[in-house]
Image (cartoon, rainbow, N blue to C red):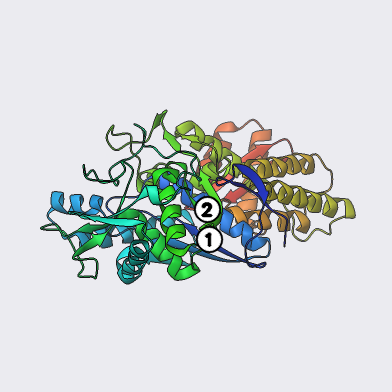
Amino acid sequence: MMSIKVYNTLTGQTEEFRPEREAEVRMFVCGPTVYGPSHVGHAKTYTQFDFIARYLEASGYKVTYLQNITDIDDKIIRRSAEQGVPPEEIAAFYEKQYLEDMAALGNTRVDVHARAHDHIDAIVDQIKRLIERGHAYQLDDGWYFDLASFPAYGKLSGRTDLRPEDSVSRIDDNSKKRNPGDFTLWKGRKDGEPFWETELGEGRPGWHIEDTAITETFFGPSYDLHGGAVDLIFPHHEAEVAQMEAASGIEPLARYWMHTGLLRVDGEKMSKSTGNFLTIREALARTDFRTLRHAFLSQHYRSSMELNDSTLEQARAARRRIENFARTIDPAHTDSQANTARATDAWKEMRERLDDDFDTPGALAVLFQYIREQNRMEEPAGPAALRLIEDVNNLFGTFDIPGVAQTDAAVDERVKERDRLRAAKKFAEADAIRDQLTQQGVVLEDSPEGTRWWKETTS
């Protein structure tokens, strides 16, 4: 296995990544609550974890990537009441939309999407164990987790108290709670809301318990990697730790915790309440999916980032530099030892950067340096360069690479005719040829070495 280092939120340190089973990684990332359209904050997190899963596989691990779908929740019920549509229809509609959005982004690595409503029995079983172990108590509106019974609460986030910036919508307010931060495990039945008949009484699960019941079903009480956005650390991920470790008596719930930085849109934190909210579909109407992926992957996953027209244009220009270089590659060329060595060294250095906590911006910087050096060489780029670009694209999925230089005798002749007209200073006629080629989807690039061309794709 490759030696990979990961920043672990649990310890606050960068550590060597050592999964419990030497050649396998069991990886869980918190999925969406399907009550509305998925937004670009989701796109950032899930694109970056898609990359992490791809890189772990490229490093020799067998990865099982699990993601939950929260399809039972207060937010879904509120949206149901607003629209006069049953909650299950709301959830099914937006789950379908979410999966379509992930496919449109090229996020392909999730192995299992587990819906909360399919795991009610596992949820009830986990709550029963918490009750038996003295970690839960019942009030008139349901069952609660008793924070005082779990002294380790706070070990992930470094705190135990709610703050003004925290989302408290899923920590139910009940004046009879033993501790202010106690959270709901099982909500008692309310008129007009979905419910299940169980040994806990009629009702439905709380938010936090859905995730740990799902991960225990697929991975057992302890697994390798838990991911999500940084704003989920407290209270959601802290609650997950408390629930699972209290129910099983086994720790840690996850050996490594990884969190992505937040996304700001057009200079402001994204928020539905302020109207500063961009859905994935709206973003893909502004730009193509490769450019959006590249924008996310050109930033370190732990960094907060700004998404606006400027960052999208920078990402578009960066990926086109790589695509333009790929179009100069001659796959029929026989590489010299020096050419092969340059590509091999670049790939090795990129891997070293990625081994250091998945440093995607560092790896891309190596690739751009390689391209600059190769462009200065008299020897053309050949198969070694093509293998490098293809290996990079298998990980990033952000480049439109044809694999071989494009050829079309008719286009070649028109480009040569345009060059002759330009040399004769007949610019109007030369521009007319460019316009004709543009209408055919052919892009021209003039450079000191001559005119290059390629056929633009629709993506």
Dot label at residue 49: 2
Q: Position of residue 422 (x, y in %)?
A: 64, 34
Quarter containing the N terminus: bottom right
The mark that comes first in sequence, 1 or 2, is: 1
User: What's the residue type where badge 2 is placed?
Assistant: Phe
Question: Between tags 1 and 2, which lies in front?
Answer: 1
Dot label at residue 27: 1
Q: Position of residue 382 (x, y in %)?
A: 77, 55
- For this view, does 388 lie left or right of residue 196? right
Viewer-nearest residue: 146 or 16: 146
Viewer-nearest residue: 19 or 335: 19
How far apart are the two marked residues, 1 and 2, measured between alpha carbons? 10 Å
Q: Residue at x 79, y 40 (%)?
A: 373
User: What's the residue type where badge 1 is placed?
Assistant: Met
Question: Is mark 1 in CB contact (under 8 Å) with mark 2?
Answer: yes
Whether residue 440 can be seen here: no
Q: Position of residue 103 (x, y in %)?
A: 43, 59
- For this view, does 139 lie left or right of residue 316? left
How packed mark 1 is, by other alpha carbons closer than 10 Å (few <14, some 14-19, many 20 or more), is many
Q: Residue at x 10, y 58 (%)?
A: 191
